[in-house]
Amino acid sequence: MFEEWKSVWHKYKDFLTPNRESGQELLDYLSHKYVLTETHDKEAADSVRFNVTINKTNAEKLPDCTIPQPLTFCMALCCQAALSAASDLRTTSQAHSKNSWKR
């Protein structure tokens, strides 16, 4: 997933411009439009932290000597594959347990 994110960023980076929304405003907007699931992926959090601190516009918004503590989320669309896989496992497990008495 991280490599996919990087390729998308490289493709569009020259067209992106800094916005003026705070992290909380962005979270509020996304959570009202999409189903979000918080992730606890260190690589994703490190990526957000790195991007905030190396981006001059974002870094200037941070109070002095502050290290960002990002929260990362997965939107319903990107979680769908994981949920589908979990559902498949449950279905397979249930089918196996129902048929186990036939052996």
Image (cartoon, helix red, strand yellow):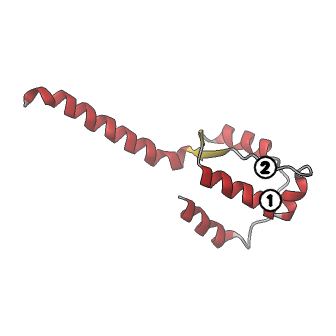
SS assignment at label 1: helix
Q: Is residue 99 above or below residue 84?
A: above
Going by the numbered disc 1, the residue's amino acid type is: Thr
Count of picture labels = 2
Tell me if mark 2 has few (under 14), some (14-19) or many (20+) residues whose alpha carbon lies within 10 angstroms of its own. Answer: some
Going by the numbered disc 2, the residue's amino acid type is: Pro
SS assignment at label 2: loop
Q: Which mark is residue 53?
A: 1
Residue at image location 74% in from the left, 70% down from the top: 15
Task: Say which quarter of the image contains residue 24.
Answer: top right
Give the x, y percent position of residue 61.
89, 53
Q: Tell me the residue that label 2 is attached to.
A: 68
Task: Say which quarter of the image contains residue 84.
Answer: top left
Asked if residue 55 lies left or right of residue 103, the reply is right
Residue at image location 21% in from the left, 29% down from the top: 97
Q: Is residue 64 above or below residue 18?
A: above
Residue at image location 65% in from the left, 71% down from the top: 10
Mark 2 vs 1: CB contact within 8 A: yes
Asked if residue 18 lies left or right of residue 100, the reply is right
Frontmost residue, 41 versus 10: 41
Residue at image location 60% in from the left, 43% down from the top: 40
